[in-house]
Image (cartoon, coloured by chain):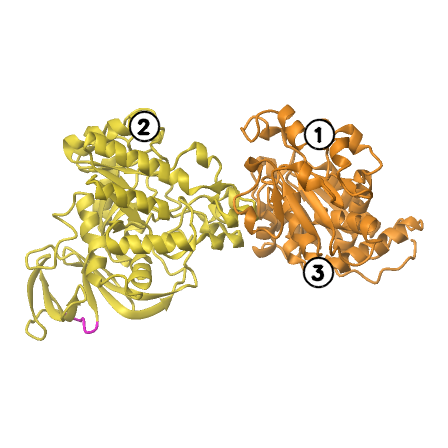
Amino acid sequence: MRHLLSAADLDRTTAIQILDTAHELARLTERGVKKLPTLRGRTVVNLFFEDSTRTRISFEAAAKRLSADVINFSAKGSSVSKGESLKDTALTLEAMGADAVVIRHGSSGAPHVLAHSGWISSAVVNAGDGTHEHPTQALLDAFTLRQHLREGKGDLEGVEIAIVGDVLHSRVARSNVLLLHTLGAKVTLVAPPTLLPVGVETWPCDFSYDIDEALTNKDAVMMLRVQRERMNAAFFPSPQEYSRRYGLDRRRMNLLKPDGIVMHPGPMNRGLEISSEAADSEKSVIVEQVTNGVSVRMAVLYMALGGNEISGDAQ
Amino acid sequence: MSTLIKNVAPLGAEPKDVLIDNGVIAAIGAAGTLAGDTVVDGSGMVLLPGLVDLHTHLREPGREDAETVDTGTLAAARGGYTAVHAMANTTPVADTAGVVEQVWRLGQSAGHCDVYPVGAVTQGLKGEALAELGAMADSAARVRVFSDDGKCVSDAVLMRRALEYVKAFDGVIAQHAQEPRLTEDAQMNEGIVSGVLGLRGWPAVAEEAIIARDVLLAEHVGARLHICHLSTAGSVEIVRWAKSRGINVTAEVTPHHLLLTDETARSYDPVYKVNPPLRTQADVLALRAALADGTIDIVATDHAPHAAEDKDCEWSAAAFGMVGLETALSIVATTMVATGLMTWADVARVMSSTPAEIGRVQEAHGRALEVGAPANLVLVDPQASYVVERSNTASKSQNNPFHGVELQGRVLQTWLRGDVTFEAAL
């Protein structure tokens, strides 16, 4: 794996390999091995053009646990805010000798441009680009689903999951549809018609406008965050109506299979797309998703940088 | 000094000898019957009237780093053009007699082809108040085509008034049809590809709704309307309907919309970012059919050079537009002639005579190839094929989406009133 730009880059074998590697890394962490020497001497740059503390510290923790040197480059207060182009930023990173660049960018396709422009020779990992994709989020979601529904092994053949919310603007939804389909799961997208993209009928999933019907007997539900800026753009009449029609409360949560799980990529709008009762329930695995995020990102960095054999030798 | 083009096929018909002297076509005779001081062998070649572009961005004044009147018109000559209409979205905007006269004079002094400035419809392209259309019409530049191209005249009242007002001097409003609210921050055609790529979609209806409104306005006030760079199958249907009602509307299509689709955006390479956006293959085929059957009247390049830094970046930060003057004829030859949809006589109609008529420059350009007509001519090798190389250009910009594409039909030589403005190195 040279770069990770889209969940579509991953075939089933590679995806399972990443999940298995993450599983192994998580096991070592649980055994008290906090740091592995695998990427010692390698430099990972977190290049964040958008604020995202959660994703950045997840990647930072992942890189540090593999002993990589980490440089955090945030657009705010940097030369980027003074008008420096993506190209010049990339050339600077190249000159500093970055081995991997983890990029979060507000423009869809920016990681793709970075990887294919010839500006840098390092591996590029997409940490979320515009309304395009967020492949490591999909990997950590797949990992979480596998832990709960498939005992942490193999693929997700036959798993049925509903993804609910602002699919139109969601990079999480796009990556999950692609990856979960690759792993054999059956995905149903649920949203008001205004928040489904044109052409969704060609995606490898089903879609529905009716959340109650879609949640019935599913193995899992993934709630998507509703962005504040959608509130006044006529995608739906009001937050209250959105919550009534598409929010996850206890009644809807109980439409899932008895051992069904509730997921959310965070940060949550409690009381809007998800009630506190659902978010804090026994079915919720939302906090666990965060933990799994570190393991999965360790696995991605490890594979992108072709790290040494994983071993449990503590430093 | 006369020039003889011997054994050449005018409009692709029977080979003739064509003699150029004193800036005009001095004689046309049976092949092998005429003599001249300089002889050009036209065997196997096609002779067309010099091409006329109704839609060119020359960027001067304001963005001389991307293009100047000199470099842009040299690129035009290399593409077989003898006249271009320079769009008004310069800095300052060509919305006064002063600016259009400046562009006109720059064209005169460059001398590679005739430059006809397009005047802005509204002051500063802001869509709020009419520019002094009459002053531009009466100026030395003799403006007849008015357009806010790059922006749509979206206010229905303003559009109505503009259509009415220019009737006084036989002008035409060339509308850039783009409903602004439906295309806020739009990045590419709204469809299957935009959904997958997560790029804000630009629905076909945003173009079609404005065209539908404007043909009805043109009918209502009895005015002449031209639709810039029509890009969707639905737009074709509306224009076809309008023409069937006798509405005085003409429409153009760009070479890139005849060849490329939104699938190219999957590369996230901003060289494919253009306004209006590249559409689907179904749209491409509908545009070709409409050009062949006359629903679409002309091909216009929308040549839009951009400095490297405006394209060497992420998609959403990139400028809209692509160069096109030097490849236009080859693309039409490849998509329309080689496919059997059009003849060379049709090419002369859609790339020379009709655009000259719409721009009201038909006395000087786009004339029939007959004795006494100005010797504005282009010699084409219809069989030659070549691979486009973006650095092989006279333009200052290289935002060329056809780089690496093999095209058929090559411009060999261009004459402007008998003077050679381009000669291919063979």
Marks 1/3: CA distance? 33 Å
- Density class for disc 3 (Cα within 10 Å; few <14, some 14-19, many ≥20) is some
Residue A194 in the image: x percent, y percent? 55, 35
Q: Amino acid at mark 2?
A: Ala
SS under mark 1: loop
Residue A43 in the image: x percent, y percent? 74, 52
Q: Nearer the viewer, residue B11 or B325?
A: B11
User: Which chain did the image draw in orange?
Assistant: A
Q: Earlier in the sequence, mark 1 or mark 3?
A: 3
Q: Nearer the viewer, residue B308 or A220?
A: A220
- Density class for disc 2 (Cα within 10 Å; few <14, some 14-19, many ≥20) is few
Q: Amino acid at mark 1?
A: Asn
- Dot 1 and dot 3 within a common chain: yes
In the rendered structure, the answer to whether residue A166 lies left or right of residue B404 reads right
Q: Amino acid at mark 3?
A: Arg
Residue B13 in the image: x percent, y percent? 15, 67
Check the picture and name the quadrant holding the N terminus of chain B: bottom left
User: Residue tagged by mark 2?
Assistant: B156
- Density class for disc 1 (Cα within 10 Å; few <14, some 14-19, many ≥20) is some
User: Residue tagged by mark 1?
Assistant: A269
SS under mark 3: helix
Q: Nearer the viewer, residue B66 or A129?
A: A129
Residue at 36% from the left image edge and 45% from the top image edge: B234
Can you tell which quarter of the image residue A270 is in? top right
Residue stretch rendered in magenta on the structure? B39-44
Residue A116 numbered mark, or none:
none
Cβ atoms under marks 3 and 2 closer than 8 Å? no
Drawing shade for chain B = yellow
SS under mark 2: helix
Residue A12 numbered mark, or none:
3
Can you tell which quarter of the image residue B344 is in? bottom left
The relative height of residue B16 versus residue A16 in the rendered view (above or below) is below
